[in-house]
Image (cartoon, grey):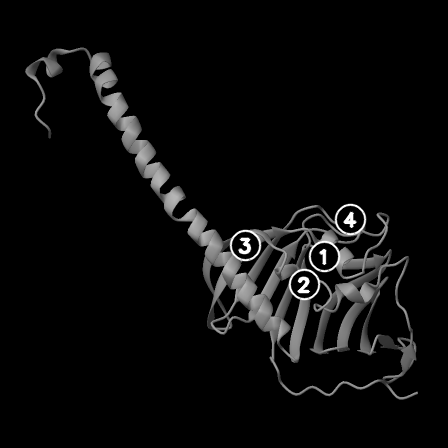
């Protein structure tokens, strides 16, 4: 304890408080201010740099596998038509295939989709076996539903447009340690930049949506979660999750035979 004059202990409590208050306020400000000044900008810069490297790593890939799932609801293209899960592969520059679980009213079907060179084929849900139908342009009023299925069209481009990224910590996925980065994103801008805009009666994208990215030690994106609706029929707290794997493994994607 510092040496205090004898008169200090005879002063009223309020007087002692007034004497100690400036020192207390200064100490509190010092200890509160130092972490914010020393750590927050560095963490933000580190997160942005890691995201940039991860985006470049993913862009350089030739192939990858993905699984799309949702929490707190499903993707509903139209009333009574729900997309409950998707699994597929991307082969750049212009090949894509997926198997989607679709719920129509009370029935649940599996529909396969293949895209090669901009043309799209889907399996006929009314036939036995994999009989493909050439659907050409799937766009509805300027919006292509395949954008919500192919992560190369929306989810991966969004990584390079995350605002205010921060490192949330380390988390494990399938036994591997990942760096998790949290931020926000404007997916409407991402859609427009990729030529996939749509009228407001189809889209319901907030200006800012929470987005989290998990990055492995090789700077590859292993998981992305984005919270919020894209279509008018979706819940406000819908979470889209895309998991990535099988990087640069051989994939054979061909246009279905006529």
Query: Of the numbered discs in the image, which one, if any, rests on residue 157?
Result: 2
Element at badge 4? loop
Q: Does dot 1 land on a helix, a strand or a loop?
A: helix
Q: Separation of disc 3 and disc 4 at Cα?
A: 22 Å
Which quadrant: the N terminus? top left
Question: Which comes sooner in the sequence, label 2 or label 3?
Answer: 2
Q: Mark 3 points at which residue?
A: 182
Residue 13, image x and y in percent?
21, 14
| Pointer 1 or 3: first along the chain | 3
Q: Name the residue under label 4.
A: 204
Q: Residues within 10 Å of mark 3 (few under 14, many from 20)?
A: many
Marked residue nearer the N-terminal end (3 or 4): 3
Is residue 168 visible in the rendered image? The answer is no
Residue at image point 67% right, 49% down: 237
Reply above or below: 4 against 166.
above
Choose the circle earlier in sequence order: 4 or 1. Answer: 1
Q: Out of 31 and 204, give the one closest to the viewer.
A: 31
Could you tell me how far apart the alpha carbons at marks 1 and 2 are, in whole angstroms?
Answer: 7 Å
Question: Marks 2 and 3, Cα distance to the nearest angstrom?
Answer: 16 Å
Cβ atoms at labels 1 and 2 below 8 Å apart = yes
Q: Residue 249: horizontal and vertical position, in percent?
A: 62, 85
Classify mark 1: residues with Cα within 10 Å, few (<14), some (14-19) or many (20+).
Answer: many
Left or right of 185 in this view: 38: left
The residue labelled by disc 1 is 190
Q: Position of residue 94 (x, y in %)?
A: 77, 77
What residue is shown at x 64% (from left), y 63% (from top)?
241
Q: How busy is the neighbourhood of tag 2: few (under 14 within 10 Å), some, or many (20 plus)?
A: some
């Amino acid at each position: 304890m510092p040496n205090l004059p004898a008169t200090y202990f005879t002063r009223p409590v309020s007087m002692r408080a007034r004497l100690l208050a400036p020192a207390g306020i200064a100490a509190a400000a010092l200890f509160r201010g130092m972490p914010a000044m020393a750590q927050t900008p560095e963490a933000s810069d580190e997160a942005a740099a890691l995201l940039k490297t991860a985006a470049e790593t993913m862009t350089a890939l030739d192939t990858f596998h993905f699984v799309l799932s949702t929490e707190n609801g499903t993707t509903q293209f139209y009333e009574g038509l729900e997309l409950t899960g998707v699994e597929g592969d991307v082969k750049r520059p212009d090949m894509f295939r997926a198997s989607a679980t679709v719920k129509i009213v009370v029935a649940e079907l599996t529909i396969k989709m293949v895209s090669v060179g901009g043309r799209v084929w889907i399996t006929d849900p009314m036939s036995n076996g994999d009989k493909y139908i050439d659907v050409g342009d799937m766009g509805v009023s300027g919006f292509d539903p395949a954008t919500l299925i192919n992560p190369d069209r929306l989810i991966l481009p969004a990584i390079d447009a995350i605002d205010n990224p921060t490192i949330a910590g380390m988390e494990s996925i399938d036994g591997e340690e990942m760096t998790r980065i949290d931020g926000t994103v404007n997916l409407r801008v991402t859609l427009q930049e990729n030529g996939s805009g749509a009228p407001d009666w189809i889209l319901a994208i907030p200006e800012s949506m929470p987005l989290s990215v998990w990055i492995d030690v090789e700077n590859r994106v292993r998981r992305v979660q984005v919270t919020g609706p894209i279509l008018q029929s979706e819940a406000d707290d819908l979470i889209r999750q895309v998991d990535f794997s099988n990087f640069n493994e051989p994939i054979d994607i061909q246009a279905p035979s006529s």
